[in-house]
Image: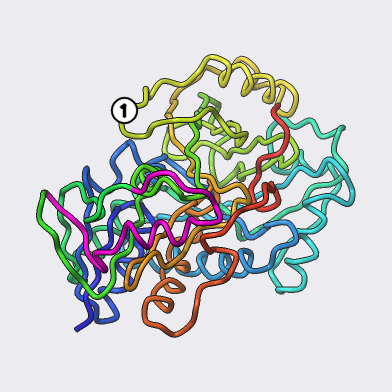
Amino acid sequence: MKSVIVVGAGIWGSSLALRLAETGWRVTLVEQHKPGHLRQASAGETRLLRCSHGDDDWYARLAWQAREDWLRLGERAGEELYQEAGMLWFAGTPDGWEHASARVLKNLDIEFEVLDPSDGGRFFPDFRGDDLSFLLWEPHAGVIRARRATQVIAGLAQAAGARLVRARAVPPAGDAAGGTAGDMAAGIAGDMAGGAAVEIDGETRHADRVVWACGAWLPELFDRLPITVTKQDTLHFAVPSAWSLPETPAWVDHGASAYGHGDVDGVGMKATSDAEGPPYEPEHGARVVDAVSVERARHYLRRRFPSLERAPLLFSQVCQYALTPDAEWLLARAAPGVWLLGGDSGHGFKHAPALAAYVAGVLDGEYEPEPRFGLHARTPSRGLRTSGEVW
């Protein structure tokens, strides 16, 4: 039986552990806290699922597969992990990101509809779209109950035979230090000279494969990686019941870095920014949202949903992104049998179950990962994420 140690029980690590355990691997899943703990990016209350990714069809196709996976996982768990309420994209220009997304969706035969801005009133009790060119409607998009989903997937992995170890893992050779993009791969391989192994509580443990899926903790362990960690404030506002899912769908304003959805489970209507926040240390960083984040949210509500301008802030949470400059993920071999998986960049959660199947194929040697995910210098780009200009 092939063995694997997966370090990190966020949504990516837990989904991979589940996939491998169900396909005959002996799996050890290592998490220093607990699956779904509040420091994880995966522990946000909700995450959006959408297939639009500008002119990129690889992520769109994977998201469509992930949608089916989430529906099946919810059936297995007996819970509605994914609420398919649809999503509206607010297009500020006729030929921008949303136009490119619509073209890809059409080519992939994924259902969508292009609407006039005046149609926004069909979806929201109050809507102002006079500054928009059109609306892009994805009826099969929606909202994932993220924290709960992370806990459920980790539980399913254990039920399938994965062993969960509560401990902090580090590379046997210690942290990476120094180096440039040019020598990044060689430097990390040198740091991982111990092969497919991890050090857990002072003990070195070996496996056929080791996957470091540590999210925002990955750059701390391997400091040559093209990943930075930023603080992301998420905000939910108290709203009348008419603003609840599924009556009110999810929405994204790509050009304004704004996104949100109707109230889910009484936590409030989410209205927050995808603009990149300041650098952040995930283990000890203060979990207090900034006043400027609240002001930006109110500014956006005033512009798009005027009646909600003074809605009380009901719930807030500090999350973090693990960002690569180009928003492409990291899936790379650091040494024989040792893989790095990270750089979710705020758009990775929804793909988790489908991505796990893809990574499992890589670990099985069925194919090499996409070159885009490699240990190479990255050119900054916003094409994949919903981060445009600051409000």
Quarter holding residue 195 = bottom left
Q: Nearer the viewer, residue 187 or 284?
A: 187
* On screen, residue 209 above or below 100: below
Total residue callouts: 1
Q: Position of residue 307 (x, y in %)?
A: 68, 21
Q: Nearer the viewer, residue 322 or 158?
A: 322
- Note whether residue 124 is visible: yes
Q: Position of residue 61 (x, y in %)?
A: 61, 70
Q: Position of residue 294 (x, y in %)?
A: 56, 19
Is 353 placed left or right of 165 in the picture?
A: right
- Note whether residue 74 is visible: no
Is 112 placed left or right of 71 in the picture?
A: right
Amino acid carrying label 1: it is His
Task: State the residue position of label 1.
Answer: 284
- Is residue 199 covered in magenta? yes
Which residue is painted at 60% across and 54% down in the image?
377
Which residue is painted at 32% across and 72% down in the image?
337
Q: In the rendered view of the protein, which quadrant contains the N terminus? A: bottom left
Q: Nearer the viewer, residue 19 or 314?
A: 19
* On screen, residue 10 above or below 29: above
Element carrying mark 1 = loop
Is 36 placed left or right of 246 in the picture?
A: left
Give the magenta-colored segment's residue range: 176-201
* On screen, residue 68 above or below 247: below
Which residue is painted at 21% across and 75% down in the image?
3
Q: Nearer the viewer, residue 391 or 167?
A: 167
For disc 1, the neighbor class at 10 Å (few under 14, some 14 to 19, many from 20) is few
- Is residue 327 covered in magenta? no
Q: Position of residue 301 (x, y in %)?
A: 67, 24
Q: In the rendered view of the protein, which quadrant contains the C terminus? A: top right
> What colour scheme was applied to this rendering of the protein?
rainbow
